């Protein structure tokens, strides 16, 4: 019988040693103290005592009790879930030099639990507000990241638009240079007459004054042999470059249409209209008068040197 008791005691000692080792507490000393729970993470409590802060570890053998009855002699076993921050309690168990204790028993008063619950009730709204604030911050960060992505996309679109505009400007420049070269190739022609008609802002319609000037110019052309009428459209610098290029073309086309339809000039006697855009301004675009002078179509009467006999 004695041998059986010794064997059982040996097993118990080994089990207690293994339990202590599992928590990193070997050859610990018995500790008994009391304090207030300041934090809980799972089965690990942080308890502030008069001797300092202890880390109290719970396990399946830890007894959590509170006094029962009128005089509180008896104790009632309760769930460890009641061990909440703010609870004043007593604990005892095996500890080590790092202020860690594997709790064997924990006791507390019902009044202390009620007070801790009141404290938690007051802290919960704060914690909830903090959680809400964190969510709001995260949502703001997400919106900021989305806005930054949108801005980056817009910047890429702007860069792409700039590239297209640059390509268009280059194309317009090439067309203007080609048109200028085409007119310069007419070196075998005499200039026998010139006329200019002007237009309103953003307009390509011919005024009555412009129509009369074109009619008079056409009548002058018919007095020669071997002649052509050269037409060049222009715009002021107001607005976008590509819009002005288009507007100068529409103005030149309006003059050519009037020559063909109303003045009955044959197609072979009209040089294809040149759209010059903002190039070769007649006056400065810095003044209203200058811009009005630049919204124009120039006509030149060209007579072939060989045909004219001059």
Image (cartoon, rainbow, N blue to C red):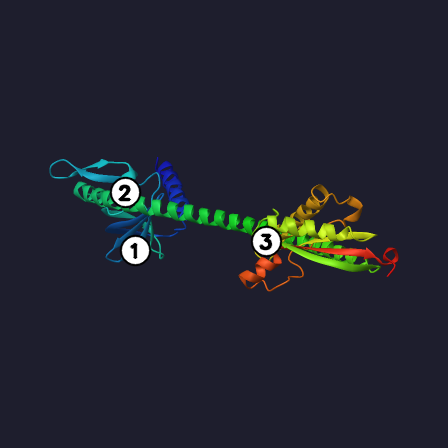
Q: Secondary structure at mark 3?
A: loop
- Dot 3: few (<14), some (14–19), or many (≥20) neighbours within 10 Å? few
Disc sitting over residue 83 in the figure: 2
State if disc 2 and disc 1 touch (CB < 8 Å): no
Q: Earlier in the sequence, mark 1 or mark 2?
A: 1
Q: Residue at x 63, y 51 (%)?
A: 210
Q: Secondary structure at mark 2?
A: loop
Q: Horizontally, is 262 left or right of 119 in the view?
A: right
Q: CA distance from mark 1 to mark 2?
A: 16 Å
The foreground one among 40 and 95 is 40
Quarter that holds the N terminus: top left
Q: Is residue 13 above or below residue 307?
A: above
Q: Secondary structure at mark 1?
A: strand
Residue 80 at x, y percent in the picture: 29, 39
- Dot 1: few (<14), some (14–19), or many (≥20) neighbours within 10 Å? some
Q: Horizontally, is 305 left or right of 70 in the view?
A: right
Residue 83 at x, y percent in the picture: 27, 42
Quarter that holds the C terminus: bottom right
Asked whether residue 246 is in view, the answer is no
Residue 107 at x, y percent in the picture: 23, 43
View extreme (left): residue: 70
Q: Is residue 60 above or below residue 209?
A: above
Q: Residue at x 79, y 48 (%)?
A: 269
**Which residue corresponds to mark 1?**
53
Asked whether residue 197 is in view, the answer is yes
**Which residue corresponds to mark 3?**
240
Q: Horizontally, is 171 left or right of 36 in the view?
A: right
- Dot 2: few (<14), some (14–19), or many (≥20) neighbours within 10 Å? many
- Which of the two marks, 3 or 1, is nearer to us in this view? 3
Q: Residue at x 69, y 44 (%)?
A: 257
């Amino acid at each position: 019988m004695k041998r059986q008791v010794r064997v059982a005691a040996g097993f118990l000692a080994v089990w207690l040693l293994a339990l202590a080792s599992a928590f990193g507490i070997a050859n610990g000393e018995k500790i008994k103290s009391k304090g207030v729970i300041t934090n809980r993470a799972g089965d690990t409590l942080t308890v502030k005592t008069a001797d300092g802060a202890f880390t109290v570890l719970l396990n399946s053998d830890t007894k959590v009790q509170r006094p029962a009855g009128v005089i509180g002699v008896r104790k009632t076993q309760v769930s460890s879930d009641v061990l909440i921050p703010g609870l004043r309690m007593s604990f005892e168990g095996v500890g080590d030099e790092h202020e860690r204790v594997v709790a064997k028993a924990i006791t507390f008063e019902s009044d202390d639990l009620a007070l801790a619950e009141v404290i938690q009730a007051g802290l919960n709204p704060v914690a909830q507000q903090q959680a809400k604030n964190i969510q709001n911050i995260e949502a703001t960060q997400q919106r900021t990241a989305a806005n930054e992505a949108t801005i980056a996309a817009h910047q890429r679109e702007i860069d792409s638009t700039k590239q297209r505009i640059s390509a268009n400007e280059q194309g317009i420049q090439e067309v203007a240079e080609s048109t200028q070269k085409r007119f310069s190739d007419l070196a075998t022609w005499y200039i026998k007459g010139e006329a200019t008609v002007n237009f309103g802002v953003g307009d390509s319609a011919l005024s009555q004054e412009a129509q009369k000037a074109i009619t008079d110019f056409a009548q002058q052309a018919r007095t020669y042999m071997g002649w052509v009428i050269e037409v060049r459209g222009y715009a002021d610098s107001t607005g976008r470059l590509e819009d002005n290029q288009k507007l100068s073309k529409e103005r030149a086309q309006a003059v050519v249409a009037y020559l063909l339809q109303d003045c009955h000039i044959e197609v072979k006697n009209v040089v294809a209209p040149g759209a010059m855009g903002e190039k070769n301004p007649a006056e400065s675009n810095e003044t209203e008068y200058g811009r009005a002078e630049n919204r124009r179509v120039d006509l030149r009467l060209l007579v072939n040197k060989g045909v004219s006999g001059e």
